[in-house]
Amino acid sequence: MKHLKFLFPVLLCTLLLGLSSCKETNADRLRAMRGDWESVKNRPAFTLFEENGHYRVTTRKMTYRGTIQTETYQISEKDGNLFIETGLSILLTYDKENDWILLSPGGEYKRSKQPIKK
């Protein structure tokens, strides 16, 4: 009986440590988000990629003259949240189950089936 009193707390601590190590980090989310994304509501598409250990977003939009304008922004983390730094911070949220990204402000994005024309 003495062994059970000692063994139970040890097993409980081991289980809790194991569960806490399964927690998904922002780095894991960013790795899963790499790729091309298209807007659900006709906003500019973007590509999320890693470059020199930093994650970045490149947007492409057609100008009224018919040329493609690209802009690249860095992704940063503040208080556990991901932001795209565009001059103002755009909150970046990832839904792993549905493979969707929500930009606030900016709307919903789904993974593009075809690569974005560069």
Image (cartoon, grey):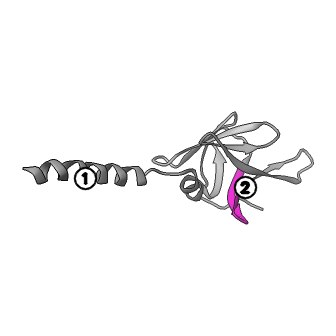
Tag nearer the camera, 1 or 2: 1
Q: Residue at x 42, y 54 (%)?
A: 21
- Which residue lies most toward the front here? 2
Q: Which residue is mark 2?
A: 56
| Element on which disc 1 rests | helix
In the image, 20 versus 81, the foreground residue is 20
Instruction: In this rendered view, identify the residue nearer to me: 3 or 109.
Output: 3
Cα–Cα gap, marks 1 and 2: 43 Å
Residue at the image point whose x is 35% and y is 55% from the top:
18
Magenta-colored span: 46-55
Q: Would residue 68 be counted in the magenta stretch?
A: no
Label 1: how many Cα within 10 Å (few below 14, some 14–19, many 20+): few
Can you tell which mark lies on residue 10?
Answer: 1
Q: Is residue 97 visible?
A: yes
Q: Is residue 22 visible?
A: no
The percent coordinates of residue 78 (x first, y second) are 66, 41
Q: Amino acid at mark 2?
A: Arg
Of mark 1 and mark 2, the one earlier in the sequence is 1
Residue 59 shown left or right of residue 36 in the figure = right
